[in-house]
Image: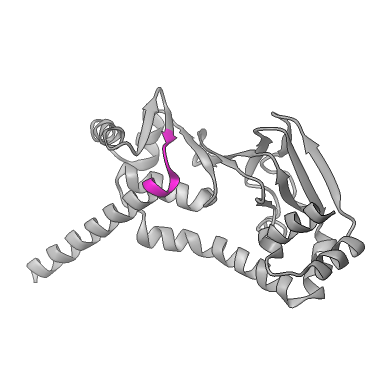
Amino acid sequence: MASMYGTIMDLPLFKGISEDQVSAFLEKTNIEFQNLQKGETLYLEGEPCTDIKYLISGTIGRTHRLVSPRCTIKEILPAGTVFGAERLFGLNTCYADKAVAATPSSIMKFSKEQYLRLLASDEIYLMNVLNFLSLRAQRSIDSLNNIYSSSLLGHIGYWIATMTDRCSTGIEIQCNIKDLVEITGIRITDLKGQIRDLKRDGILSYTAGLFKINSRSEILEAAVREHARLVSADEASQETSK
């Protein structure tokens, strides 16, 4: 039980609660546990989200569709990851991605109705979920303002920043050159040159339509630097033309 207390208290939506609050939560909530073997599905894209899921142990691979159904972004998520919080409410309550166990994994989950009662029971739960949802809501605009550019690095950086979690690893983008040209609008000769430059800089590897990201933080930092450089150059050009 002691380890269960610690596990729950470490989860993002339970940060700051006491052991007494964990006890009350366990007593009042009908918690369901689910064990997944490697390769088993946690949920599918388009499936209704009816509960909150927490990854207690193991790793989950999540796949996002990227514009074209032929292009995807995959990530590996560690224990402590929350699934479903941003899809439990609102007009669209269906999952926008697919999650499959990357290793044997254990899931703790409880229903939307139970979660609503939990939010009403103590302000700390409500503040945690508001912070969690706000982070998700803000990252698209923040990434557009600080990361996105018309280059391949800008596109990839924006996709990774908006679709993957900060704690994710093993990020891969499956997309062939033809589809990349269509999605990004970059000419094929320029695209191949940019891929070559990114490989040379050690930011990613690329083989037969598969990009493997060496470090999430490093590629985002590189995209931020490029965005800042382009903005600075544009501002300088505007000043010169005055």
Q: Pinpoint residue 55: horizontal percent, then vertical percent.
A: 71, 47
| Residue 140 shows in the view | yes
The N terminus lies in quadrant: bottom right
The C terminus lies in quadrant: bottom left
Q: Pinpoint residue 22: horizontal percent, then vertical percent.
A: 81, 64
Residue at the image point whose x is 49% and y is 53% from the top: 162
Region in magenta: 212-219
Quadrant of the rendered image containing residue 128: bottom right
Q: Residue furthest front?
A: 2
Number of numbered discs present?
0
Residue at the image point whose x is 74% and y is 54% from the top: 7
On the picture, is 196 further left or further right than 31?
Answer: left
Q: Residue furthest top?
A: 208
| Residue 90 shows in the view | no
Q: Pinpoint residue 95: horizontal percent, then vertical percent.
A: 67, 47
On the picture, is 95 further left or further right than 200?
Answer: right
239 is higher (above) or lower (below) than 182 = below
12 is higher (above) or lower (below) than 58 = below
Q: Residue furthest bottom?
A: 123
On the picture, is 5 further left or further right than 189?
Answer: right
Relative depth, front residue between 68 and 35? 35
Residue at the image point whose x is 42% and y is 50% from the top: 158
Indicate whether residue 221 is drawn in magenta.
no
Q: Pinpoint residue 143: horizontal percent, then vertical percent.
A: 42, 58
Residue at the image point whose x is 91% and y is 63% from the top: 27
